[in-house]
Image (cartoon, rainbow, N blue to C red):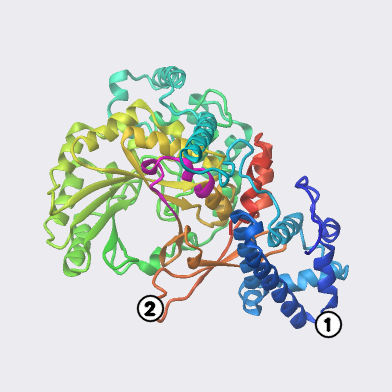
């Protein structure tokens, strides 16, 4: 054993003294090493021994403890490699040595000590065992047959009722009280804009009245001092900004924790404004390296049989953390349409590459174009014999749902040819609070015409509370949208306030999404690797945790999806955000941090 360990402690108390006091035997091993090379060997032997002993004593340990020991041992072995030190630019082994010998290390933060503490607990199968106090199952190994089945069913009833209670914390926009409140908000906006309900139902009216400046926005919704400051700075630096009147109606009269998810979509925080405004070259904001995966103008290609076509480079409103903000001037910018000639050239390129069987039309938002322009593109793509599927990536069902008229739905559906060509819509509903009766109507217009609708969720801080994403998936399925992908938030410096540790997304998938019925949890958690493509987080084979930096950042090495079929691809090094910082942020909005404590054991 490495030491007695300690009970869960307040997150402000992690330091070198608490770490050494909690794990005296571990640091006794460190003291015996004559140099760093020997220390690596001793720690490697310790990890192997603890894992082997646990496996041999498996009868006396539960499956969760065995898995924890295995996972922590694997992480420690990875961190011990000198290659990891080189890739991360930091040596955890050196830090452990310095802690043991009381060397001055002012660079090491509580977040770093917390990571080590939980890892050492995990190596012994200790640490938090239950995800939540009221959500767990007791062992029924002592029962058999009908008696076991009845007891398990009883426990499942209790578990699901608790899940329902927690999901109910996050009402959707279909809640009757919310509908009434937003109706009053709509009336206020219409009065301020001297318009009628007939205008409200016209999607072009919303385009015409996109809110682009602070003064007008301040008249239509109550803003905090920080929001005003950030918007003013964003406009001063000509950063993309714009909100539709419809989306403004979704904001509450007073900012609150639930309303934060709506505001965060479109109101940039000051951290974003400062980072972007300091960037001299906009291509530096191309986090995904799309310039390096664009073989032809308007086309992005990362996979063998599918590509992205971008005919329209603007949206009715701007999502702050959009990966393509660097390309967009403003909402519905003039000149956003690529033009018929450039689009035809791009489609001819697709025609010449018979390997392409699927085209995703995105941008910008292609449904911000007029019907005729979109129809022309669909006609050209449908005329290519090798194109079997056309997807339309659009957020208009959420930002201007009245855009989805019967006419446009009929037009898109006209290109369906069962057994020959599929048409599908990929949208982005970010929070259950965005789902309104208008969204339901828009989605139903697609579904009743045989067009499936899928959702891509970005797992930001504002959807990351316990069972918050579950509430979204549940409502999505009820209105006819299939959960498709849950994306780990892009690791861009300017969107730091949106980012969530990978461990939290993994925890959410295992401890929350897994409790939903199958069709509600069909989405796949992914990390989008710059210049390469999607890396599936459910498999540890696709990544290694190689280091923990002094500030508590976990450093991951992501392996390319084609690593087994390519001789030239390289891995991608990613610096996550500190788990401790994330938990402290949750505490500030009233969350019980103890409910999240198993997060430390998701690697």
Q: Residue 5, how many percent across, how many down?
A: 79, 55
Q: Nearer the viewer, residue 235 or 152?
A: 152
Q: Quadrant of the N terminus?
A: bottom right
Q: Nearer the viewer, residue 182 or 600?
A: 600
Residue 494's place in the image compared with 197, above or below, is below
Please provide the residue range marked out in magenta.
509-525
Residue at point 15%, 63% (across, down): 386
Residue at point 13%, 52% (across, down): 419
**Which corner quadrant of the image does residue 115 belong to?**
bottom right
Query: Which class describes the residues within 10 Å of circle 1: few (<14), some (14-19), or many (20+)?
Result: few
Does 161 appear in magenta? no
Specify whether residue 403 is in view.
no
Q: Nearer the viewer, residue 332 or 72?
A: 72
Q: Upstream in the sequence, badge 2 or badge 1?
A: 1
State left or right for residue 107 relative to residue 404: right
Residue at point 76%, 82% (across, down): 38
Residue position for label 1:
34
Query: Which class describes the residues within 10 Å of circle 2: few (<14), some (14-19), or many (20+)?
Result: few
Residue 108's place in the image compared with 254, above or below, is below
């Amino acid at each position: 054993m490495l030491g007695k360990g300690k009970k869960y402690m307040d997150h402000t108390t992690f330091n070198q003294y608490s770490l050494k006091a909690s794990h005296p035997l571990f640091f006794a091993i460190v003291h015996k090493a004559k140099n760093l090379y020997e220390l690596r060997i001793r720690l490697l032997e310790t990890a192997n021994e603890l894992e082997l002993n646990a496996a041999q004593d498996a009868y006396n340990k539960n499956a969760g403890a065995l898995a924890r020991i295995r996972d922590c041992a694997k992480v420690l072995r990875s961190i011990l490699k000198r290659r990891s030190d080189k890739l991360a630019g930091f040596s955890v082994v050196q830090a452990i040595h310095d802690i043991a010998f009381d060397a001055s290390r002012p660079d090491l933060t509580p977040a770093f000590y917390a990571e080590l503490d939980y890892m050492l607990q995990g190596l012994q199968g200790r640490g938090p065992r239950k995800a939540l106090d009221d959500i767990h199952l007791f062992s029924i190994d002592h029962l058999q047959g009908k008696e076991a089945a009845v007891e398990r069913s009883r426990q499942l009833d209790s578990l699901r009722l608790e899940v329902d209670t927690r999901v109910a914390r996050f009402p959707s926009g279909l809640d009757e009280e919310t509908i009434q409140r937003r109706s009053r908000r709509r009336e206020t906006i219409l009065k301020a804009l001297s318009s009628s309900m007939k205008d409200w139902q016209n999607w072009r009216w919303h385009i015409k009245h996109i809110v682009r400046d602070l003064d007008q926005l301040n008249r239509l919704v109550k803003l905090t001092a920080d929001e005003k400051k950030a918007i003013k700075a964003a406009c001063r630096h000509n950063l993309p900004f714009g909100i539709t009147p419809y989306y403004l109606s979704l904001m509450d009269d007073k900012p609150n924790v639930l309303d934060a998810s709506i505001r965060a979509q479109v109101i940039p925080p000051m951290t974003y404004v400062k980072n972007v405004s300091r960037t001299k070259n906009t291509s530096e904001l191309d986090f995904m390296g799309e310039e390096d995966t664009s073989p032809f103008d308007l086309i992005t290609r990362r996979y063998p049989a599918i590509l992205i076509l971008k005919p329209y480079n603007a949206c009715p409103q701007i999502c702050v953390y959009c990966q393509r903000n660097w390309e967009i001037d403003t909402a519905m910018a003039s000149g956003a349409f690529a033009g018929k000639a450039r689009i035809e050239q791009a489609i001819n390129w697709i025609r010449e590459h018979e390997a392409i069987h699927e085209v995703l039309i995105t941008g910008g938002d292609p449904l911000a174009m007029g019907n005729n322009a979109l129809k022309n593109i669909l006609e050209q793509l449908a005329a290519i014999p090798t194109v079997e599927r056309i997807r339309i990536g659009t957020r208009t069902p959420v930002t201007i749902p009245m855009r989805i008229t019967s006419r446009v739905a009929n037009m898109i559906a006209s290109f369906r040819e069962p057994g020959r060509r599929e048409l599908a819509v990929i949208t982005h509903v970010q929070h259950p609070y965005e789902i309104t009766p208008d969204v339901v109507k828009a989605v139903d217009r697609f579904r009743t015409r045989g067009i499936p609708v899928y959702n891509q969720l970005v797992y930001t801080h504002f959807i990351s509370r316990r069972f918050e994403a579950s509430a979204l998936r549940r409502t999505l399925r009820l209105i006819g949208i299939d959960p498709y992908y849950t994306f780990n938030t892009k690791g861009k410096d300017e969107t730091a306030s949106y980012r969530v540790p990978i461990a939290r997304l993994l925890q959410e998938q295992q401890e929350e999404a897994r409790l939903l019925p199958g069709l509600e949890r069909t989405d796949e958690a992914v990390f989008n690797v710059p210049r390469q493509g999607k890396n599936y987080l459910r498999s540890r084979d696709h990544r290694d945790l190689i280091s923990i930096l002094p500030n508590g950042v976990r450093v991951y090495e992501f392996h390319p999806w084609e690593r087994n079929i390519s001789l030239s691809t390289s891995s991608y090094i990613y610096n996550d955000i500190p788990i401790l910082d994330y938990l402290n942020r949750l505490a500030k909005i009233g969350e019980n941090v103890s409910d999240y404590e198993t997060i430390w054991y998701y690697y």
